[in-house]
Image (spheres, grey):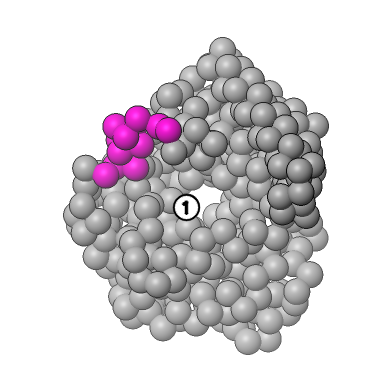
Amino acid sequence: MTQPDLSIIIVSWNVQELLSNCLRSVLGQSERALQIIVVDSASSDGSAAMVAEEFPEVELIACQENVGFPRGNNLGLAQANGRYLLLLNPDTIVHDDALAKMVAYLEENPQVGVVGPQLLNEDGTVQSSRRRFPSLKTALFESTWLQPYAPQSVLDDYYVRDVGDEETAVVHWVMGACLMTRQEVVAQVGGLDEDYFMYSEELDYCRRIHGMGWQVVYYPPAKVTHLSGKSSEQAVTHRHINFNRAKLRYFRKNHGRFAAGMLRLFLLVSYAWQMFVEAIKGAVGHKRPLRWQRVKAYWMVLRSGLRPAGY
């Protein structure tokens, strides 16, 4: 059996229509030596049956439970035999010859271990998808209620705003919505850390790859539309919990117990404060259903304790 140039792994959960559109965009690419693997995470919307019926050329791994993004990708990686490997979200549309361009870039640049395309929003605007590794200062501001008050230099550095949207650049990590690597990188580094479940797994993975001496590159000639967060929208409270647990796991692994402990305390105090503010607004009658919904969500976050998995 001829080894495919590229194995594509798509982990999907309850996004049947988006998954169908994603697969059609992939099958329309000029990179024809493809192996496509869909890992269905126990979807209840008929996704697995749709793949089996409409896309018989796709290899389907139908899980009996929601296994999460890292474990799902690891199941796909174990079955993948392409020279290059693409982790692709189901809420994406691959444009033009993006896959062929990314494969060619890796072939021409043997020092590059990961390449990420330019991600686009649904309206065609550029989505932020390139990053530098976060510091503790970054973590206190980014994606917290303090973000609007962050020093501009902190966020500019983290989001790599000194690099133009159309400029190919070596960065620290790229978003996992579309991330291409090499078979030899996976052989050297291993799979994704399954204790993340979702969020920060690509940050952790790129850091491990970077630590082995490989470069990570943002490559805008390849373009992919990303309809951000469509799976996670289905469970908003769990999104808060999983996002912050993942952040804490990353800092515990890479910055130590003290840094992670301080960050966890800050996050818990932040959610307690936000819950108090929302309760006051609800009590005086301002958008009460929304306020009580948020109070309930923030209370569930506090009850979780935000303890990172594995520690």
Residue carrying label 1: 176
Residue 85, x across and y down, in percent: 44, 58
The residue lying at 58 percent from left, 79 percent from top is: 20
Name above or below for residue 194 compared with residue 181. above
Instruction: From the image, give the main secondary structure of the stretch colored magenta.
Output: helix
Residue 28, x across and y down, in percent: 41, 83
> Which quadrant holds the C terminus?
top right
In magenta stretch: residue 152? yes
Residue 19, x across and y down, in percent: 58, 74
Name above or below for residue 50 compared with residue 243. below
The residue lying at 54 percent from left, 36 percent from top is: 145
Q: Decide: few, some or many residues near mark 1? Use Cα within 10 Å; few <14, some 14-19, many ≥20.
A: many
Residue with the most extreme front position: 284
The residue lying at 47 percent from left, 52 percent from top is: 176
Secondary structure beneath label 1: loop
Query: Is residue 171 visible to us here?
Result: no
Query: Is residue 54 visible to us here?
Result: yes
- Seen from the viewer's position, the closer of residues 96 and 228 is 228
Q: Which residues are magenta?
A: 149-161
